[in-house]
Image: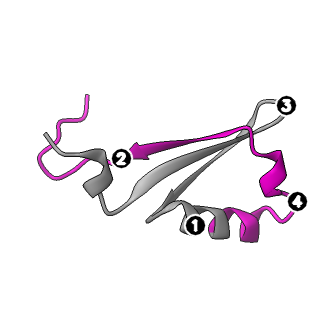
Amino acid sequence: MYNMLNYAIKLYIIHFPYNQAYGVYAMDISDAWDTLSKNEPWVAVKNINFIEEHGCAGPFDTIH
């Protein structure tokens, strides 16, 4: 089984107030934030409720 921290690309789901959430594929959280802030200029760090980090499937993982 792979450790989630060893994946090259991760899915970051960034949650904001009023049930708004954005999913960003990135190498790390700073890359995810740079991508999101360029595409959605209204977002601000102070408005983040929480961030989920999910590892993407590896070459030997089974996806159901």
Say few, some or many: other residues with alpha carbon within 10 Å of mark 3 (under 14 / 14 to 19 / 20 or more): few
Q: Nearer the viewer, mark 3 or mark 1?
A: 1
Mark 3 or mark 1: name the one nearer the start of the chain: 3
Q: Is residue 1 left or right of residue 12?
A: left
The residue segment tinted magenta is: 35-64
Give the residue number, with chain letter if any, for mark 3: 18
Q: Are marks 4 and 2 in contact (CB under 8 Å)?
A: no
Q: Nearer the viewer, mark 4 or mark 1?
A: 1
Q: Is residue 28 left or right of residue 19?
A: left
Give the residue number, with chain letter if any, for mark 2: 55
Secondary-structure class at tag 4:
loop
Give the residue number, with chain letter if any, for mark 1: 30
Mark 2 or mark 3: name the one nearer the start of the chain: 3
> Residue 35, position in %: x, y?
64, 68
Q: CA distance from mark 2 to mark 1?
A: 16 Å
Q: CA distance from mark 2 to mark 3?
A: 26 Å
